[in-house]
Image: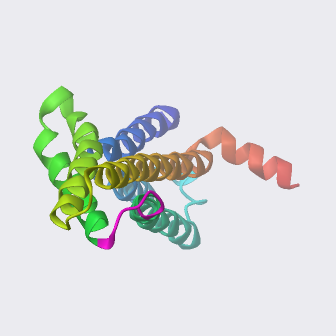
Amino acid sequence: MDYFLVILFMIFMFAAILLQIISLPGNWIAIIFLLLWKLIGPASSTHELTVTFFIILVAIAAVGELLEWVIQLKVGKKMGSTGKGNIGGIIGSIIGSILLLPLFFGFGALIGALLGAFVGCYVFEMLSKRPHNEAIKAAWGAFIGRFLGMGLKLGLGITILWLSVVRMWPSAQEAIATAML
């Protein structure tokens, strides 16, 4: 029965992490599922879920949130985006995510976030009287930066899942204990 419950929670955590694709806080939801597991899961698979472990997971999730936006800003800046263009890219990304969320079973939010970053940056650059070719280059920077940031955040989510599974899976704990001896 323990294995069934672990697999069920792993599926919930994985689904939560995938919510990042539609611009929802998937890493945080996965951590909440893991906390729920700590509270209601079998004792044999919860003793490795310490306060220190949860602090590490929260730090990983926070770094993911920060890097998602910093990468978009840095890549945009590197490709010529101004501060206003970067703000436009972030605003556009959020609006695009929300507007396209209903399309393609929710995956429209991914497309919306990327296109929104491009369009938002482009519009703000044009409003700042930048030449068209410079505004397009800056907008591509916002698009690429957003894509890379989202990918990194998703990768950190998979890391959270992996670190959690190793501590939740009953036989994995036995293997770790044996290896430590």
Residue 61, image x and y in percent? 45, 62
Is 89 in front, or is 48? 89
Q: How many marks?
A: 0
Q: Nearer the viewer, residue 29 or 153?
A: 153
- Whether 4 is drawn above or below 20: the answer is above
Q: Is residue 1 left or right of residue 123?
A: right
In the picture provided, is 173 more to the left or to the right than 90? right
Identify the residue shown where x is 61% and y is 42%: 170
Residue 23 can be seen, yes or no: no
Residue 113 in the image, given as x and y percentages of width and height: 26, 47
Q: Quadrant of the C terminus?
A: bottom right
Location of residue 47 in the rendering, given as x and y in whole percent from the top left corner = 58, 60
Whether 167 is drawn above or below 70: the answer is above
Residue at horizontal 17%, vertical 47%?
A: 96
Q: Could you say which quadrant of the image residue 62 lies in?
A: bottom left
Q: Is residue 140 magenta?
A: no
- Magenta range is 77-83
Quadrant of the rendered image containing residue 79: bottom left
Residue at left offset 58%, top offset 72%: 52
